[in-house]
Structures are given as structure tokens and as C-alpha cells.
């Protein structure tokens, strides 16, 4: 009898140990960090900084590569990601088009078909005019547009429902402006939008805060508002938030990380740990500070909640604009 009890105890221990081993995962080959934009852009630079810090500061014992899969407003990058369902050797930078694209374009992959892994940081949108503009503040801009939504033309990059357009619409909607009647000019890039407002082709621009730094410092543009929850530093130290100007609006253009659908709990736990540690490194935080980006790490579970909330908010405004059903 004692013999059978001993055998039973050994079997239990093997099962328990086996279950523990099954809960442990780490990469066994190189990891791909997929970016839905070309080399040199903001998302690409984020991915390459992640790659560098994982190697140099976290000392992880696997190789990684950044893969640029452009097209469809990042949509093609997510299609490629999900060609590797359940394989945690593939990560992708998550950008706002992951939410807005499927709302506007039938057949695009919804964000719910991917595994949320992290929310990395927020960046905010600045609003600027020429130094000689009669618009002296965000409050004056709002007052004009309340009276006549077409009274001021606003340049945005790089598409309708992009981050700069959404920051504009959400702020002005909160201020009581009829956003369906706004005069919005869509530009292909930051350089074109800055040249356009300087040349008087439109009255104001909405652009990532980092993209406006040099022109605010040189006095070639004047900041009138920023979409953040508090004032930014440096060139934006004197630029008030919308909230400071009695407009109840905060808008963040965010970046995060997703994995393919079907990832296991052990795979998610591994990347939760790695990405949490990465975002605490001094090098990561210093780089964000230089770009006026706000550290805002969330783990996988909290990122899922954040994306759900973003989906609800952005769907509502896109429907109002007639850009989504």
C-alpha cells in the first residue's frame, strides 16, 4: 500500500511541476517588431529604441529586428502580425489607426483580433498660428468658430481622422463648435503644414507638439493651445492647455504594443514583464522627455480597457462627422 502511495505522490509532483513549466515562456528565436510606417518616422524610431534597450539595458538573450510593413494606415502591418497567430515572437507597434481604420473602412482587421500587450506613452497635439495672426489664444479661436465654424481654416496632417484632425475636432466639439462645418485642410506632412500656415494659405495648424518645437523657439509660429492634461515643458512652457482656456478636452495620440491573436497567458506575462521594465529605464524616459512625450505605461489587461474606451469615444465622433457608420 505504501508503495502505491509513494507512486501516486511522485505522479502528483510531476503533474504540478509540468504545469509550472507550461506556464513559463520566453523567446526561442529572434523577435520581430513590426511597424506600419516607413523607416525614420516616429513609430519606427520607437520600435528601434525598444529594440536597442531590450538588447543593451535589459540584457535579453534573443535577437530582434524591426520590420516595416507600410500600407493601409498600418492595416497591412496587423495583417502580417496575425499571419503568426499564437506566436509571441511577433510584436507590432499599435497606433491610433488600429482603432479608426476599421471604423471607416469595411474589412479592416478590428483591434479585438489582436492581443493587447502594452500602452507605452502619450503625445499631445499643439495648435499654432503665425506670429502676426489676430488669433492670440485658443479661447479666441474658439470664439470665432462658435460664431462661424468656417471663419478659420485649419491645416492638419496627414488624413481626416488622423490624430491631428481628431485633436482639433474633439477640442472644438467640447467648446460648442459645429465641427461638421469646419474648414479643414489636409496636408501630406509636417513640413507642408508649417510652410502653409507661414505662407498664409490657412490660418492655424494642428501638429504633434514635438513637430512644432523649433518654430516656436525661433518665433516663426505662436502656440495657442495644447491638447495635454497639463502644460508641456520647453518651447511649450507658455502655451496653455485647452482646459486652462475653459475647453474641457484632453487628447492623446498614443503608441503601444500588440501581439497576434491567440497568445497564451504565459506569453502575455513574459511581455508584460519585459515591457514594464523597458519603460522604467532612464534612457527610455529621457528619450520621451526630449520629444515632449508622456510616459504612460499600462500592462496588457489595462491596455485592453484603454483600447475599448478609445473605440467608444472615437467611433462617436467619426459617426458625427460622417466618416463612420
Image (cartoon, helix red, strand yellow):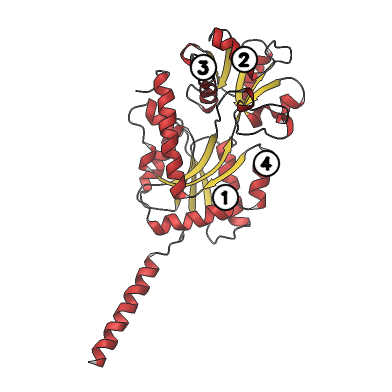
- Dot label at residue 51: 1
Q: Nearer the viewer, mark 2 or mark 1?
A: 2
Q: Which mark is residue 3?
A: none
Image-quadrant location for residue 213: top right
Horizontally, residue 108 falls left or right of residue 253, namely left
Q: Quadrant of the N terminus?
A: bottom left
**Quarter location, residue 224:** top right
Helix, strand or loop under label 4? helix
Residue 176 circle label: 3
Above or below, 156 against 28 in this view is: above
Q: Of the residues under marks 4 and 2, which one precedes in the sequence? A: 2
Q: Position of residue 244 (x, y in %)?
A: 64, 26
Give the x, y percent position of residue 254: 53, 37
Residue that lies at the very extreme toward the front in this rendered image = 246
Q: Is residue 96 visible?
A: yes
Number of numbered discs on residues:
4
Distance in Å between CA atoms under marks 4 and 2: 29 Å
Residue labelled with disc 4 = 289
Q: What label does residue 141 carry, if any?
A: 2
- Disc 3 secondary structure class: loop
In this rendering, which labeled residue sits more in front, label 3 or label 1? 3
Dot 4, how many residues are within 10 Å of its Cα: few (below 14), some (14-19), or many (20+)?
some
Q: CA distance from mark 1 to mark 4?
A: 19 Å
Q: Secondary structure at mark 1?
A: helix
Q: Is residue 129 left or right of residue 306?
A: right
Q: Residue at x 62, y 10 (%)?
A: 201
**Whole-Å distance between the Cαs marked 2 and 1?**
42 Å
Amino acid at each position: 500500500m505504501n508503495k502505491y502511495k509513494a507512486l501516486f505522490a511522485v505522479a502528483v509532483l510531476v503533474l504540478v511541476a509540468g504545469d509550472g513549466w507550461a506556464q513559463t515562456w520566453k523567446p526561442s528565436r529572434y523577435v520581430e517588431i513590426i511597424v506600419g510606417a516607413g523607416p525614420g518616422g516616429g513609430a519606427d524610431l520607437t520600435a528601434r529604441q525598444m529594440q536597442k534597450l531590450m538588447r543593451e539595458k535589459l540584457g535579453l538573450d534573443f535577437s530582434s529586428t524591426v520590420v516595416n510593413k507600410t500600407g493601409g494606415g498600418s492595416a497591412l502591418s496587423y495583417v502580417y502580425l496575425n499571419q503568426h497567430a499564437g506566436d509571441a515572437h511577433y510584436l507590432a507597434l499599435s497606433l491610433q489607426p488600429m482603432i479608426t481604420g476599421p471604423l471607416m473602412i469595411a474589412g479592416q482587421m478590428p483591434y479585438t483580433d489582436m492581443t493587447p500587450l502594452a500602452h507605452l506613452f502619450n503625445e499631445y497635439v499643439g495648435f499654432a498660428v503665425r506670429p502676426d495672426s489676430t488669433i492670440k489664444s485658443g479661447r479666441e479661436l474658439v470664439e470665432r468658430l462658435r460664431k462661424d465654424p468656417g471663419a478659420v481654416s485649419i491645416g492638419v496632417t496627414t488624413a481626416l481622422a488622423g490624430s491631428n484632425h481628431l485633436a482639433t475636432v474633439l477640442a472644438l466639439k467640447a467648446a460648442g463648435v459645429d465641427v461638421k462645418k469646419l474648414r479643414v485642410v489636409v496636408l501630406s506632412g509636417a513640413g507642408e503644414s508649417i510652410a502653409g500656415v507661414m505662407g498664409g494659405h490657412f490660418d492655424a495648424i494642428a501638429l504633434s507638439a514635438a513637430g512644432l518645437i523649433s518654430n516656436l523657439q525661433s518665433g516663426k509660429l505662436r502656440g495657442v493651445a495644447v491638447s495635454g492634461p497639463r502644460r508641456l515643458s520647453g518651447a511649450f512652457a507658455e502655451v496653455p492647455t485647452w482646459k486652462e482656456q475653459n475647453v474641457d478636452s484632453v487628447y492623446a495620440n498614443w503608441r503601444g504594443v500588440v501581439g497576434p491573436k491567440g497568445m497564451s497567458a504565459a506569453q502575455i506575462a513574459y511581455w508584460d514583464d519585459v515591457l514594464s521594465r523597458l519603460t522604467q529605464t532612464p534612457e527610455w524616459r529621457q528619450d520621451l522627455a526630449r520629444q515632449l512625450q508622456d510616459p504612460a505605461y499600462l500592462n496588457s489587461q489595462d491596455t485592453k480597457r484603454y483600447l475599448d474606451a478609445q473605440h467608444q469615444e472615437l467611433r462617436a465622433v467619426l459617426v458625427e462627422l460622417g466618416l463612420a457608420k
